[in-house]
Amino acid sequence: MERQKLKETLTELHSELETSTEPVDAETIALLRQVATDIDKVCLTESPAVEEESPVVEEKEGMLDQLLSLTEEFEESHPKLAEVIGKVASALSRIGI
């Protein structure tokens, strides 16, 4: 169920990036798309249990940190985008990332 919510939230992020009326520079859009793609690839596929110190765990934690940083960065200039990014971060937390 939580993975489904994450998929829906990622779809919302992609949609917001495509339709945002708030100007976002191309580099930021590319970064957000890459993060969304990485999350799709790493978190949404069922994988066997991984060790606590594995590169996959570190990669997932790094993505969450990056999302939280982007949320703070966009709070004033792009509130809707910050909201959607925050939803993605929350969804990741709920599935144990």
Image (cartoon, helix red, strand yellow):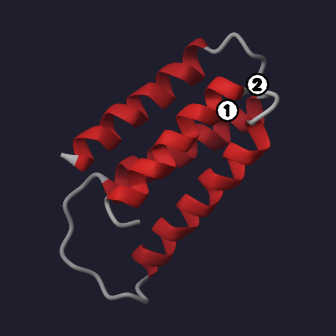
Q: Is residue 58 above or below residue 13?
A: below
Query: Which residue occupies 75% across, 29% down?
Result: 26
x, y percentage for residue 39?
43, 51
Q: Nearer the viewer, residue 71 or 56?
A: 71
Q: Which callout, 2 or 1, points at the residue further toward the start of the chain?
A: 2
**Callout 1 crowding tier (Cα within 10 Å): few <14, some 14–19, many ≥20:** some
Whole-number angstrom distance, CA of label 2 to CA of label 1: 7 Å
Query: Which residue occupies 78% across, 18% down?
Result: 23
Q: On the image, which quarter does residue 18 sit in?
A: top right
Quadrant where the image shows the C terminus: bottom left
Q: Amino acid at mark 2?
A: Val
Relative to 78, is 94 on the left or the right? Answer: left
For residue 46, the mark is: none
Q: Nearer the viewer, residue 31 or 66?
A: 66
Q: Is residue 17 above or below residue 5?
A: above
Q: Are marks 2 and 1 in contact (CB under 8 Å)?
A: yes
Q: Which residue is mark 2?
A: 24
Q: Nearer the viewer, residue 20 or 93?
A: 93
Query: Which residue occupies 25% across, 48% down?
Result: 3
Q: Which residue is mark 1?
A: 29
**Dot 1: element:** helix
